[in-house]
Amino acid sequence: MKTLNRTLLIAAALVAGPLAAQDIPGGGVATPADTTPPAAAVPMAVVTVGSPAAGAIGQFEAPKQGLEFNGLSMQIGGAFAQTFQSLDHENTATPAAKTVLGEIRPGFSLANANLNIGVQLARGIRVDLESYMASRHHNEFWVKGGFATIDASPFDVPVLNRIMEFTTIRAGHFEINYGDAHFRRTDNGNALRNPFVENYILDAFTTEIGAEVMLRGPMGSFVLGGVTTGENKGNIKEGAVDASPAFLGKLGFDRQFTDALRLRLTGSMYTAESSPAVTLYGGDRTGSHYWGVMEDSSTLRQGTAFTNGRINPGFSNEIRAVQLNPYVEFGNLEVFGVIERASGKTAAEAERREVNQLAGDVVYRLFRDQLYVGARYNRVNGDFAGQKDLEVRRTALSAGWFLTRNLLTKVEYVTQEYDGFAATDIRNGGKFNGFLIEGVIAF
């Protein structure tokens, strides 16, 4: 906590220092006229509160930026989530040191917090730095990623201007745009866009170093292509497993047909031949919001066990993943689906394995989106790490209340069951259920 406080004070000083020398509309201290002539004045750096990383309800890819540029500007945003849970778990595994479930009780989990800083550098060029101030797996301040987005040509050349009218380029270390489920997931403290407390069982989310190019077409259509390192960290070490780039693509449309009807349909693919650390289904280093379930007592308080309720197939070679996502808004009703198939293997395996995911969310929003009720069904089946024909099922019911557009309280009842796991696996005959209450602030 002392380290966090010190970091925040330093950040505040870094922000406040330049502001003190600027003439800010509505406040601030002006630079004395007798030391800086008006003709030599430095363009003002405007700082506003609120970050696109927080997102908006129903938003997927960010819309194109405006072309007006009046000088360097900065946005600062944050997100916080605090959860109370009352969950019970059970299993039928053969009793052993690592198969006896730890005892858990109702209580509050560690609060999660994000900090996002965005800077508009030039016409159509923006840089974002996304950080986690506190998370379940890393309680220290650490960076999620940093990247540049180019939405317009910084040079006033007619050909470039025309191309950039429908083109968006993103490069750096960023959350890859595979599938649509990652737009609706909880990202540590940023849980505003997720109608439920937790993410999907097969959680397709990772940050990788690379670039993406998106082309927007008529009638809400778009196509995206990208290439990344296939790893969530930089790595130059030669290892036993060859490192090859990963490729991703996305094709879809998103159109508001009438005031009451919006339809979106996308298909995404991700492929990588081999990598020392592919994390397509294990890239979330912050942690699940279901604490301690299906976990033995020796790891309940350790950061090494932080993905409770999720399944990671552990692919590192010959990865092929496809995700289809239909989305419908009809009046106050919202329906979102995940149809996903992924295959791959580890370097030690001779044959590829396959896993499948099916999920559906139904959300009904009331009183101009201030209240909502929702239901989710999620099923994953396939072969995982030496075990075949496994299945995990989850059903969740939720309700939420937006006290303001940036402040949300949600309640969830969840039940999850595990089938087909070996008697020596702690998840054999596993089940957990109960309710959670979560408060979220994001701006």
Image (cartoon, helix red, strand yellow):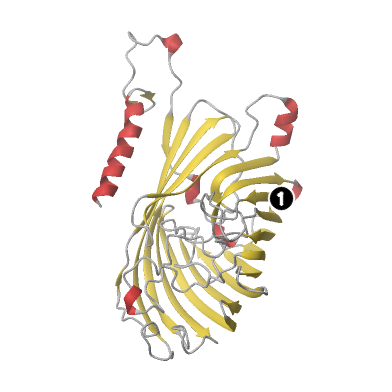
Residue 213 in the image: above or below residue 97: above
In the picture, measured across the screen, residue 345 lies left or right of residue 201, that is right
Q: Is residue 258 visible?
A: no
Q: Amino acid at mark 1?
A: Phe
Q: Position of residue 426 (x, y in %)?
A: 43, 83
Q: Position of residue 238 (x, y in %)?
A: 56, 53
Q: Position of residue 30 (x, y in %)?
A: 33, 19
Callout 1 crowding tier (Cα within 10 Å): few <14, some 14–19, many ≥20: some
Residue 383 in the image: above or below residue 158: below
Query: Residue at point 50% right, 67% down?
Result: 199
Q: Residue furthest left?
A: 2
Query: Residue at point 60% right, 59% down?
Result: 275
Residue 322 in the image: above or below residue 174: below
Residue 416 in the image: above or below residue 10: below
Q: Is residue 233 visible?
A: yes
In the picture, measured across the screen, residue 69 lies left or right of residue 412, that is right
Q: Position of residue 194 (x, y in %)?
A: 49, 62
* Image mark count: 1
Which of 267/423 is in front?
423
Which of 394/282 is in front?
282
Using the rendered view, name the quadrant where residue 383 is placed: bottom right
Instruction: Give the SS element for disc 1.
Output: strand
Using the rendered view, name the quadrant where residue 134 is placed: bottom left
Using the rendered view, name the quadrant where residue 343 is placed: bottom right
Task: Write down the residue under mark 1.
Answer: 222
